[in-house]
Amino acid sequence: MWVLYDTPKRSKHLLSPHDTVPHRTRPPMHLRKIMLCDWWSCRQVVHYDLLPTGHEITADLYSQQLERVQQALY
């Protein structure tokens, strides 16, 4: 799951019927992303990792996470 942690704030405007909506350019949606890897039991989150930008899930990383999940469960 990708988590976007730079969310722009939006403001509310009260407009009369003949006013136009103020136009504002939006920043790109994917400025900074981190990968959230979370592992659940039937009751709660057992383990999670936040991977830095540009990192991917590899077989080695996946098996390391599985070992940490197993340690957390037992």
Image (cartoon, helix red, strand yellow):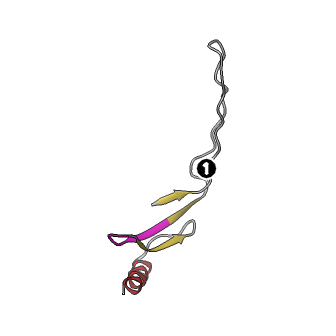
Quarter holding residue 34: bottom right
Q: Is residue 3 above or below residue 44?
A: above
Q: Residue at x 43, y 83 (%)?
A: 68
Dot 1 corresponds to which residue?
Answer: 7
In percent of width and height, residue 46 lies at 41, 75
Image quadrant occupied by the C terminus: bottom left
**Amino acid marked by disc 1:** Thr
- Residue 5 placed where, x, y %? 59, 57
On screen, residue 27 above or below 3? above
Is residue 13 rendered to the left or right of residue 72? right
Q: Residue at the location (41% across, 83% down)?
A: 72
The local secondary structure at tag 1 comes to loop
* Residue 19, image quadrant: top right
- Percent of width and height locating residue 35: 50, 65
Q: Which residues are magenta?
A: 36-43
| Main SS class of the magenta portion in the image | strand
Q: Residue at x 60, y 57 (%)?
A: 32
Residue 67 image-quadrant placement: bottom left
- The percent position of residue 18, horizontal first and vertical second, equals 64, 12
In percent of the image, x 55 and y 66: which residue is there? 54
Q: Is residue 31 above or below residue 53?
A: above
Taking the magenta stretch, the answer to whether it contains residue 42 is yes
Identity of the residue furthest to the left in this view: 42
